[in-house]
Image (cartoon, helix red, strand yellow):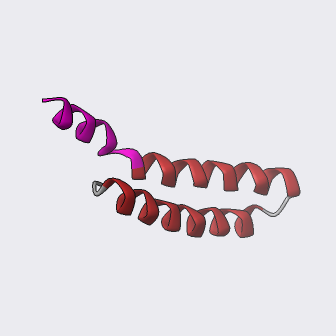
């Protein structure tokens, strides 16, 4: 039972990692006045981080 609850908690982790990277990219873009470039970099880093999180947890 504990294993099922732990797996359920990890199921949305990759989505949060992806959105977090986009938000960080948005903040950097606003700070340096380079919005499009920073968002694209945040998007790319988010996709890579989402893949790593999915690989580590085995869940989307």
Q: Is residue 28 left or right of residue 52?
A: right
Q: Residue at x 64, y 69 (%)?
A: 40
Residue extending farthest to the left is 1
Between 49 and 29, the one nearer to me in the picture: 49
Quarter that holds the C terminus: bottom left
Between 37 and 14, the one nearer to me in the picture: 14
Between 14 and 2, the one nearer to me in the picture: 2
Q: Is residue 23 left or right of residue 13?
A: right
Q: To which quarter of the image does residue 54 belong?
A: bottom left
Q: Residue at x 72, y 64 (%)?
A: 38
Magenta segment, which residues?
1-13
Q: To which quarter of the image does residue 35 belong?
A: bottom right
Q: Position of residue 3 (x, y in %)?
A: 19, 36
**Does residue 51 sit above or below 7 in this rendering?**
below
Q: Is residue 12 left or right of residue 4?
A: right
Quarter that holds the N terminus: top left
Residue extending farthest to the right is 32
Q: Position of residue 17 (x, y in %)?
A: 50, 50
Total number of numbered labels? 0
Q: Residue at x 77, y 57 (%)?
A: 29
Main SS, magenta region, reads helix
Q: Residue at x 67, y 50 (%)?
A: 24
**Does residue 28 sit above or below 47 in this rendering?**
above
Q: To which quarter of the image does residue 6 belong?
A: top left
Q: Position of residue 30 (x, y in %)?
A: 80, 51
Does 38 appear in magenta? no
Between 26 and 12, the one nearer to me in the picture: 12
Q: Is residue 26 left or right of residue 14?
A: right
């Amino acid at each position: 039972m504990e294993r099922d609850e732990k797996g359920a908690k990890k199921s949305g982790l990759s989505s949060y990692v992806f959105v977090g990277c986009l938000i960080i990219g948005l903040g950097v873009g606003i700070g340096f006045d380079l919005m499009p470039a920073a968002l694209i970099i945040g998007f790319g880093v988010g996709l890579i981080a989402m893949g790593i999180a999915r690989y580590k947890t085995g869940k989307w």
